[in-house]
Amino acid sequence: MSEQTSATIPTTSNRGKWLTLVALCLGLFMIVMDGNVVNLAIPKILQSFGSTLSQMEWVNNAYLLVFAVFLITFGRLGDEIGRKKLFIAGLITFTVGSLLCGISQNVSTLIAFRAFQALGGAAMMPATLSIISATFEKKQRGIAMGVWGAIAGLGIALGPIIGGNLTELGLGQHLNTLLHVTEFWRYVFYINLPVGVLGVLGAMFFVHESREENFSKQYDIPGIILAALAVFFLTFGFIEGPTYGWWTVAKDFTIGGHVLSLGSLSLIPLFFTLAVIFFVLFILRERRISKDPLVDLRLFQNRNFSVGNIATTILSFGMMGAFFLLPLFLQSILGYSPKESGTILLPLAIALMIAAPIAGKLSDRFGAKYMITGGLIVGAVGAFIMAHFQLTTTTHDLILPFIITGIGMGFAMAPLTNATLLDIPPSEVGGASGVLTTFRQVGAVMGIAILGAFLQSSMPNNMTTHVNAIPNLPSAAKEKLGVLVQSGDFLSQSGNQAGLQQQVGALLMPTGATKPTAQALAQVQQLGTAIVTAGKQGFTDSINTTLKLAALFMLIGAGTSLFLRRGKSEHEPDVPMAG
């Protein structure tokens, strides 16, 4: 590794450090909030452009792919050319990308500008962590990381609320007229503009530059390409696995109108195989480079860094999987709007916001190891309590498990980030932050994809069980509903009680009759209600089982965190370092 003396670490006043943190958190808040806000606007964007659902999926997928692919490269680039420069460049790129997304006139340009926006996010995210590590000495770094985690929680909390209000109401009649905005979904991108401007100004005045002074100016281009390809195929595989099939073909894979086929075998296993191949080639490449590799593989000889990346992946897997499931239950089963769902999730996010800086402060004093373990256990307990949803669940019933889960996530997330980067030399903290953020992002994508696939695969059996248990339902109706359940359309149609009643009514009509009798109508209404309930109960059972799986992964993460080293940094003294 590069020696500690090869890095420029600024000496910053205590007040200056916290102003630096404020500037960094503006950029972080914008990135986290943007993902939550855009998700809520997707239906309105689809309606505005008249695009297909598969096209709209790429509004998010393009962002996720580009973001994941460039994290390692930009993290290391910050070490070499300057972390402040890269953070500001990323902030400007993200803000300009937001403007371009807002003025997009078709879905193709929107997808392209989302990819451009992701370049800015990929430059900013690892820079926030590396600048914190370069600015704060170890005894204060925990609470700084805690504030970082709290702001991430704030973005998660406010994203759905802001997104729901902007998409439905815009900025109010007068401002909408003044700004000539009639499609309110565009505000979910425009909202980033004032935040981005404030962030750039704050970074220019309050963030001090830090970099690796002994960089040889020889960029590891082959390493960048191999790492990008490995992360691309891995992330793409997890994103598109549910669409194209994890093993057998569920949908034709087309590029430029041409179908790529391996017979009945899906292309997803091929993508995972390519990810492994490029990853192995990347490792072989990095082992041969003695000067300024993209990733110094000796970082993984550090126990905290290796264990921390694994635990971070598991935490992101369980946490994002759970966050993905909650809105589904709130909206599909309990019938809340996206805006209402965001409000209901506030106790979870607020608990995370409060717990994160407290955990950071305590980890500065007592160490992070057992705090991370305890936080993951508490988070698992919260997820397990949630995994007992009922059709009669009320918002009051959700408060306690949401608070427990939020506290657990808050106590695990920030100390885990700090512990992972604890022993990294200042000269390499940017590249290490890029690696950590990539592991976190891949874990989140895996959680949503794998837990989502598990949810979908368990629904048909659960729904069929509840449909078959309905008394007095004719066998012909059961057979028809069984086909509907297996097709995957039952959940969407279970919300259309009138439509299902009409189908059941047709099955109940006597042969040759033009309409059902009054007695049949009453029976139809009763059975229609029972069918809707069966569909929702089957979906709820599947969500509960999937939440238990997420809780299990959090417990595995807790066990993994026990391998973290509890002691102080091997590379950094407890005094500020002058550049």
Image (spheres, rainbow, N blue to C red):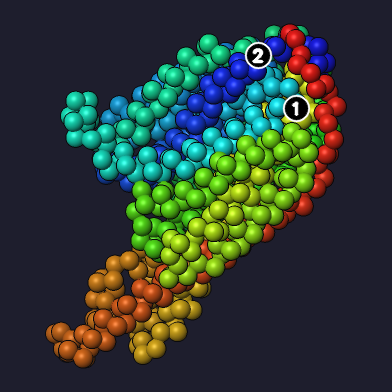
Comes first in the chain, label 1 or label 2: 2
Classed neighbour count for the residue bearing mark 1: other residues with Cα under 10 Å, few (<14), some (14–19), many (≥20): some
* Residue 497, numbered label: none
Q: Which residue is mark 1?
A: 139
Q: Is residue 163 left or right of residue 549?
A: left
Residue type at the position of mark 1? Lys
Is residue 267 visible in this depiction of the protein? no
The local secondary structure at tag 1 comes to helix
* Residue 13, numbered label: 2
Residue 34, compared with residue 492, is above or below; it is above
Residue 223, compared with residue 306, is above or below; it is above
What is the number of callouts on the image? Answer: 2
| Residue at left offset 36%, top offset 34% | 188
Q: Is residue 57 left or right of residue 122?
A: left
The x, y position of residue 547, in whole percent, is 57, 60
Quadrant hosting residue 510: bottom left
Q: Is residue 197 left or right of residue 47?
A: right
The x, y position of residue 361, in whole percent, is 69, 35
